[in-house]
Image (cartoon, rainbow, N blue to C red):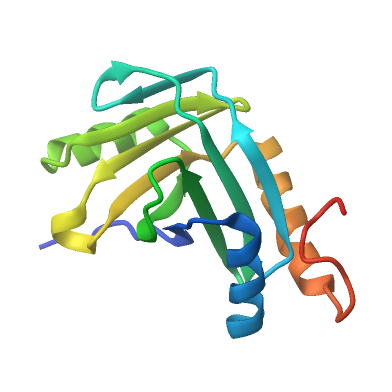
Amino acid sequence: MSVPTERVLFQHAYYVRNLEESIEEWHRLFGAGPFAIAPHHRTDTFAYRGTSTEADVSYAFGYLGDLMIQFIMYGNGEQGFHHVAYLVSDFTAERQRLLDMGFEVACELFADGVNAAYFDTRAVTGGFTEIHGDPPHIKKVFARWRQAHADWRPGDSLILGR
């Protein structure tokens, strides 16, 4: 049996009821942050279970060490673990690999020049798995957020841009 190529998880994501309260709580508990907030994030394309739609979703992104933490606020008020994510250079090939493994695409989107897809891997992970394209511009954004975490000092805002 051959050893599979390692997929490095870079993100854990959680549904939350309130972005700013979650930021405060995660900072107090773990030292996460600061966080960039993307209210009512818009996508170029968005499909849920194969149906094109537009979802009103707000996000917050911050770091805890080398791990990106994402908070997802969606109108249904859910709370808890949502997904893990890893970056891919060949989005099409990785998407097909997961389909070939029998995982169903739950959601696909294209935004900010990047493809992302969420696969229903709940039977394996207890949540979804996101594959996320890794073009240079998005890696730079993630690096800025990671550096903000490293540079954060008591008294600094937990919300980037404030």
Residue 25, image quadrant: bottom right
Q: Residue 6: where, in percent of width, then height?
A: 35, 60
Relative to 50, is 11 above or below? below
Relative to 70, is 114 above or below? above
Is 97 in front, or is 102? 102
Relative to 53, is 85 above or below? below
Q: Residue at x 47, y 41 (%)?
A: 132
Relative to 109, is 145 above or below? below
Q: Residue at x 56, y 56 (%)?
A: 18
Asked whether the viewer can see residue 3, the reply is no
Q: Residue at x 21, y 51 (%)?
A: 121
Q: Is residue 156 left or right of residue 117?
A: right
Q: Is residue 11 left or right of residue 22?
A: left
Q: Where the C terminus falls, by quadrant? A: bottom right
Is 77 in front, or is 97? 77
Q: Residue 141: where, in percent of width, then height?
A: 72, 46
Residue 30, image quadrant: bottom right
Q: Residue at x 24, y 58 (%)?
A: 4
Is 18 in front, or is 162? 18
Is 155 in front, or is 102? 155
